[in-house]
Image (cartoon, rainbow, N blue to C red):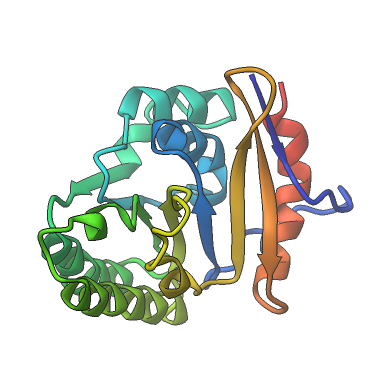
Amino acid sequence: MRFELAPSHSHASRPLLAASSALVLEAPRRATAMILGRLAPLFLEGERRLYVADGANCFDPYAFSREARRHGLPDDVLDRVFVSRAFTIHQLSAVTREMFPPLLRREPQVALAVLGLEHLFLEESLRVAERSRVLLGVMADLEGLRRGGARLLATHEPAPKGQGWWKPMLAFGDVRARALQQDGDDEWKLEIERCDNGANAAYLQYLAPARDRLVE
């Protein structure tokens, strides 16, 4: 298996992920758990816990734990990962508004993830205006959590042409990236699309030495 992280930077140091960083990752649903497992060292540093809101039913504990262990985390890594599955946009909103904030108050610099952020908002039985209103609320919740010190990851799938009305609403966070499949079925490259100046600098410096460890 190969998993390359770009861009490449100096390997001289390995700072921790900035507390208030947010990574927005475009990745196919089928690969989300695997990629999250390979990124787990960025979010589970030390004894930190990861709380996941799964909006696309894509968290596979076996794929996640396999990849997390392959990249340096202990066998009991799943003991520090907690998953809440949402099946409607309002359930997802309840997680970001009612469940996540108390976790941040209890665990400073908590790690939070929302998987398949856009998935539930594609339900056409709901009016676009309602879906937009709720999605904007979710994004406001996540930005508030980031400003409060949380480490955040949000994933979404590539938007089919002409169907990405929701994508501009995901323009938050410090880093945007895409997971690109390479020649082999299990070869992926994480391409950094946008990096803001400031807090994310430590995040990208951390990716550089992690690259050697994540390539097998």
**Residue 126 seen anywhere in this rendered image of the structure:** yes
Please state if 60 lies on the left or on the right of 148 as rendered.
left
Q: How many marks?
A: 0
Look at the image and tell me in which quarter the N terminus lies.
top right
Please state if 97 lies on the left or on the right of 73 as rendered.
left
**Residue pictured at 46% horizontal, 39% vertical:** 28
Position of residue 59 measured from the top left corner of the image (x, y, whole percent): 31, 36
**Residue pictured at 51% horizontal, 60% vertical:** 24
Position of residue 29 measured from the top left corner of the image (x, y, whole percent): 39, 38
Q: Quadrant of residue 216?
A: top right
**Residue pictured at 33% horizontal, 57% vertical:** 118
**Residue 15 seen anywhere in this rendered image of the structure:** no
In front of the other: 30 or 212:
30
In front of the other: 66 or 30:
30
Q: Quadrant of residue 131?
A: bottom left
Position of residue 214 measured from the top left corner of the image (x, y, whole percent): 68, 32
Position of residue 102 measured from the top left corner of the image (x, y, whole percent): 22, 72
In front of the other: 130 or 151:
130
**Residue pictured at 66% horizontal, 69% vertical:** 200
Does 27 sit above or below residue 155? above
Does 16 sit above or below residue 191? below
